[in-house]
Image (tube, grey):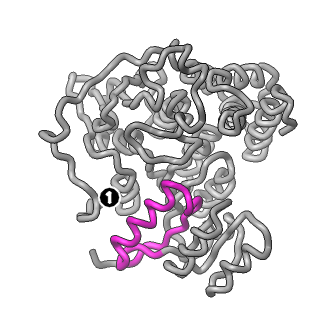
Amino acid sequence: MGGSVKGLAVLGSTGSVGTQTLDVVRAFPDDLRVVGLAARRSIDLLEAQVKEFYPKLVYYEGASQERARLVSNGSFEASMIDIVLDSDVETVVTATVGDVALKPTIEAIRAGKNIALANKESIVMAGPMLTRLAEERGAEILPVDSEPSAIWQCLRGDERDVSRLIITASGGAFRGWSPSELADATPEQAVKHPTWKMGPKITVDSATLMNKAFEVIEAHYLFGVPWEDIHVVIHPQSIIHSMVEFVDGTMKAHLGLPDMRLPIQYALFHPDRVRNDGVGRFDPVAAGSLTFEEMEPERYPCFELALEFAKLGGTWPAALCGADEAAVDLFLSRAIGFLDIPVVIREALDGHLPVDDPTPEQALAAARWAAQAVHGLVGQGG
């Protein structure tokens, strides 16, 4: 492409979105440079990434002897905040799960860095704060999730006169299961997504539709669309990622293969589009029929629960994120059943004492309180 090389910090580099971000970097070595990598686990993979990309800075949440393996290759150990604030970093890819990216994201925006946002929890926990700060500091929040990215691309050049947003959902691993079958659902079954390759936490969230509620919240904050004008439909093929309807009845839909490298690449090169022969192309004939179904709220109690608490504002959305993360962890460790996830989230949040217009510290405290409350409900301490 030519021009200057864009420096990247990738937070969560060993996860699904992080590794696919590095796939995009591999495809464009003359245009993208990895300045910093951060991960909380998977030391062997992180070490391999450090050896391949030679980042200036690296963060790992692990033992000192493991961290020593990373800096032996010429990188310097740094906190995530130090990484995102480095002068060589232009864009921060937040590909972590949970609340760990919230403070680095805020500090990066304050410094005027662009955020390629894959971490839903950050925008759910502090949407008004992040969008206000980005506007003040001239930073861009570039959505990486396929559905918000699809909306963003459909709105390009057509930001006004939006009537409604339609976000599609695959229905997750348990679409069509009966309540009795769901009662016996196992973690191994939950993490087998029918169309996407994602990490375990987000795949379970896809099965409960908590993930889709987070995308509704993200769309509300990023695009300023009222809650009542954002709708969700089940689309099992995961080909149409979202649709935008305008006031004159015109509808734009974004279609593409279920490949996260497409929205990642769009965010990293925005406003340009670049050719990547390593990414598959959609063939409408091969795809066959595309179908849609009504989203039945009674089948997905986490969806309505999440929007109920998100609309309350303050620290409620942060507490929601903390409770959900803890509940999913307990399900994955077999401490609770799949149908218990919305039950323990609601029971925990019933005890939350909210704070209006929270600081980042208060939002994080609310999330951690809620996680402890969930653990306490099942006698696991937290």
| Residue 5 lies in the magenta stretch | yes
Q: Which residue is tagged 1? A: 271
The quadrant of the picture occupied by the C terminus is: top right
Going by the numbered disc 1, the residue's amino acid type is: Pro
Task: Tell me the SS state at disc 1.
Answer: loop
Q: Residue 149 location in percent, x, y?
A: 38, 45
Q: Is residue 349 above or below residue 41?
A: above
The one nearer the camera, 162 or 47, is 47
Residue at the image position 28 percent from the left and 59 percent from the top: 279
Q: Residue 341 location in percent, x, y?
A: 66, 26
| Residue 174 lies in the magenta stretch | no
Residue at the image position 70 percent from the left and 76 percent from the top: 77
Residue at the image position 80 percent from the left and 33 percent from the top: 375
Q: Is residue 40 visible?
A: yes
The quadrant of the picture occupied by the N terminus is: bottom left
The one nearer the camera, 288 or 356, is 288
Around disc 1, counting alpha carbons within 10 Å, would you say few (fewer than 14), some (14 to 19), or many (20 or more)?
Answer: few
Q: Residue 344 location in percent, x, y?
A: 73, 23
Residue at the image position 77 percent from the left and 24 percent from the top: 348
Q: Residue 311 location in percent, x, y?
A: 60, 23
Q: Would residue 3 appear left or right of 10 to someone viewing this image? A: left
Q: Is residue 138 visible?
A: no
Which segment is the magenta one? Answer: 4-33
Q: Is residue 378 above or below residue 277?
A: above
Q: Quadrant of residue 111?
A: bottom right
What is the residue that sits farthest to the left in this orientation?
A: 285
Q: Would residue 364 appear left or right of 305 to someone viewing this image? A: right
Q: Quadrant of residue 317?
A: top right
Q: Would residue 125 appear left or right of 300 to someone viewing this image? A: right
- How many marks overall? 1
